Amino acid sequence: MMEDKLKGLRSKRRAQLAIGLFIGIGFGFLLQKGGVTRYDVIVGQLLLDDFTIFKVMASAVISGMVGVHLLKSLGLVSLHPKPGSLGSSALGGLIFGVGFGILGRCPGTAAGAVGQGSVDALLGGVVGILLGAGIFAWGYPRIEEKVLRRGDFGDVTIPEILGVNRWLVVIPAVLILVGLLFWLEGMGT
Amino acid sequence: MLEQFEMDLWSPYVVGAGIGVLNCFAFLLSDRPIGCSSAYARASGMIERAVRGPKVEAKAYYRKFEPVVDWEVMLVAGVVIGAFLSASLSGSFRMETVPPLWRERFGPDPILRIAAAFAGGVLLGLGARWAGGCTSGHGISGTAQLAASSWLAVICFFIGGVATAMLLFRAGG
């Protein structure tokens, strides 16, 4: 019954575009209220002076991880882990990191920064990200062949690698993240 | 209630937990995780098509990520609107070109800041598509799903980011 309703909703194109917009509005609202659309907060995290980014991300991972796996156990959602490889995830991740450190925003927080009036995030950041994505699309066939396939491990999840039930990873992961957050608060950062 | 919306900053834990809940809604209502960077690839394809014509659609990458307005493009548009609402309600909306921390280290020149932001943006866009996701798709959604690719990518995002920020702000005193 519930599954059929969800299936129907997921196949309606206009409704889906509206849902994407509304989730985006909520996401942007929260990012701005969290202060994480600010250059100083992001670079403060990368300089290990201000742990706001870590606190927001860890909390989002904790609630998302518990929620998504509960919904999965109820049979209401499917997981969509992204495929990865050393050439893609590690090298791409490092290139991203250098850009992250210079721009002081990521693709999501750059969009949020535009909404709060950050001119550098619009004229520099968003324009740059669009060009960077375009350069990747232009080079994609060669990058794919020569780099992205190196050290391919597919769309595997950590519980699948370990060969254990999902909850045997979810619960310890949540405990570790909660422990780290308490430790950070204890340090007064 | 309205007072909450007019506050400048919320607790990072409330904000993070809320983002995780939104991610659950994305899975439940749309059968997909929250992500941002593929929207930039599609938008880039749409701009290129407007300039160079429909032959752009033949590129292998745009056959994979069609240059059309999809769920994620709407999400990124929503992020701009949501952040604008939040900043307007708290009175923190402000046109700013040079962030305070940047000004302290590199001075008030807006051209220098925009040029640096542009260079950073190019690497960010390139790296996000290279890694197949950004701080949202890998950092928040992929990690929550316990995807191996996402945990590796997010660790590399922060290794690259911390090294770059330290080099920019701590090198040479």
Image (tube, coloured by chain):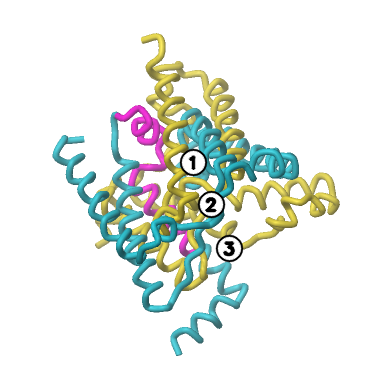
The residue that label 3 is drawn on is: B71
Looking at the rendered structure, the kind of residue marked 3 is: Trp
Q: Residue at x 72, y 49 (%)?
A: B45
Q: Which chain is yellow?
A: B
Region of the chain picked out in magenta, as a range = A22-48
- Callout 1–callout 2 Cβ contact below 8 Å: yes
Residue A32: image tag: none
What residue do we see at 41% from left, 42% from top? A37
- First in sequence, mark 3 or 2: give its number: 2
Q: In what element is the residue under mark 2?
A: loop
Q: Residues within 10 Å of mark 2 (few under 14, many from 20)?
A: many
Hue used for the chain lettered A: cyan
Kind of residue sitting beneath label 2: Cys
For disc 2, the chain is B
Q: Which residue appears at 53% of the width and 36% of the height?
A: A96
Identify which residue, B87 or A75, lies in the foreground.
A75
Circle 2 residue: B36
* Residue extending furthest toward the front: A163
| Image position, residue B118 (x, y; %) | 59, 30
Residue A101, can we see it? yes
In terms of secondary structure, where does tag 3 sit? helix
Q: Position of residue B84 (x, y in %)?
A: 45, 50
Q: Between marks 3 and 1, how big is the CA–CA gap?
A: 19 Å
